[in-house]
Image (cartoon, coloured by chain):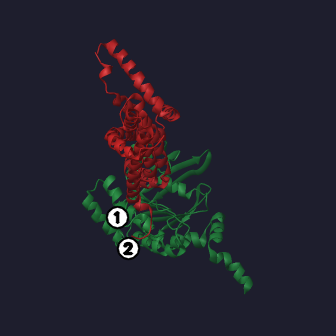
Amino acid sequence: MTIDIPFIWVAFKEIIKALPITLILTIVPLLAGFLIGIVVALVRIYKLKYLYRIANGYVSFFRGTPIIMHIMVIYFGFPLLLDQISLRFDLGLQTNNIPIILFVLIALTLAAGSYLSEIIRSGIISVSNGQLEAAYSVGMTKFQAMIRIILPQALAQSIPNFTNIFVGFLHTSSIAFLVSQKEVTGAANIVASVNLKFLEAFIAAGIIYWGITILVEGISFLLEKKVTAYNRGGVS
Amino acid sequence: MIYLKGIKKSFNQLPVLKGINLKIEKGEVVTILGPSGSGKTTLLRCLNFLEKPNAGLVQIGNIIVDAEKATKKEMLAIRKQSAMVFQHYNLFAHKTVVENVMEGLIVAKKVKKKDARQQSERVLDKVGLSDKLDHYPSQLSGGQQQRVGIARALALNPEVILFDEPTSALDPELVGDVLSVIKSIAQEGITMVVVTHEMSFAREVSNRVLFMDEGVIVEEGTPLEIFHAAKEERTRRFLQRISGETYFLPLKEQVN
């Protein structure tokens, strides 16, 4: 078996067309998951009645099971559930018309929410109690103190962790090809099968993932430098 | 005016305050002395409900709160009557010096941003930091940070400023700076309650000195009365231990 180096470029050009889908599958779940994460983190920190147990269960389940399983269960389970509901209430829903990407996005969002909630929670806990007391002492409510004092510091400190999660989810989005979503890995698989050049196609896909990762790490580094400038001391 | 009646506080069944009664008039500067574990910091924190007393009545200005059934709203109201200067400064780490001072004005007092900035700059000028407005706390020395802490409290123009060992975390050479700022505020007639180990400060600045031990106020009086004619044995023992001069007096006599 030989390696067809020029074909890597051919494959690259073909596969990169699927990059937007990969980015959607990464960014949308992380943004939606971020909102879930903040709510879940606050519920768990303040131990809100009942909700607290639900939040615990949610985090435990989604962190305790592989993401590929979430995608499968939601992809096969959701249409079944919707069909049942539709039948009972005579809604006339056509689950076949729901784009597959929606199921994948829901699964990834739920997973992202559980991972991000733990990052946000640890960020909040890492802000010293003195900050909260100072906020109270100038007359802030709990909510004002959280929004204006605690969360900004917690999130700034969590940037390296957010980057980790981003990179992780960028790569995890490749699972979506199992339910025939044509993202980068799916596209590579198609190019590979059609031309029977697997090595070349997946090398091309690898270059794309690596390139995006390097880019994101660079942005994260600059962002972190900017938003944690307050913490570094020294006279500017 | 501050009025405390029957303040009790326990941590895990360990009583720390055993029924404190206290009245502080407007404009008074009161220092609280006492050995560590005597409950003086807890008493100060009970005043603004950073620690919620188990029982008792707290009044600051015209807000009266029964600690046993204090609601969040009441606690907030009483906090807005006071401001606190912390041992470890507790400046908002992600905000610049001037933003630290503005924060309370904007959020709790609903002052417009422009006015808040003006007021903050004025107060920061008073504590000698008008050249550090846009620095972050991490770029300042301990003494400078504590002066920002004082400015933050002062800007709120509260009924009372609570000082929780404001100089104990500072390098000895920076203590003087901070004390002189506190002194100058005291002379403006702002009510202050100061927990401190700085005996010279208590002697020179305060109108009244409280000596606490084991969760009760053992003795109170003017600095003169406490430092030179303490009635209680416990007070005398404490002062003797803490003041270097008297401690070394017998030694000096021996040497001579």
CA distance separating discs 1 and 2 = 13 Å
**In x, y percent, where is residue A88?**
34, 12
Q: Residue furthest bottom?
A: B256
Total marks shown come to 2
Task: Using the image as rendered, state which of residue B110 and residue B92 is in the foreground.
Answer: B92
Q: Is residue A113 left or right of residue B197?
A: left
Q: Residues within 10 Å of mark 2 (few under 14, many from 20)?
A: some
Task: Using the image as rendered, state which of residue B80 and residue B227 is in the foreground.
Answer: B80
Q: Would you place residue B81 above or below residue A103 in this image?
A: below
Looking at the rendered structure, the kind of residue marked 2 is Gly
Q: Would you place residue A114 above or below residue B92 in this image?
A: above
**In x, y percent, where is residue A129?**
49, 52
**In x, y percent, where is residue B30?**
48, 64
Check the residue under mark 2 and report the chain it is in. B
Q: Would you place residue A67 above or below residue A211 in this image?
A: above
Which mark is on residue B128? 2
Q: What residue sits 42% from the left and 72% below the top?
A: B181
Task: Name the quadrant of the C terminus of chain B.
Answer: bottom right
Which mark is on residue B98? 1
Q: What residue sits 59% from the left and 62% below the top?
A: B34
Helix, strand or loop at disc 2? loop
Check the residue under mark 1 and report the chain it is in. B
Which mark is on residue A203? none
Chain letter of the green region? B
**In x, y percent, where is residue B91?**
43, 60
Helix, strand or loop at disc 1? helix
**Chain A rendered in what hue?**
red
| Any part of residue A203 in sight | yes
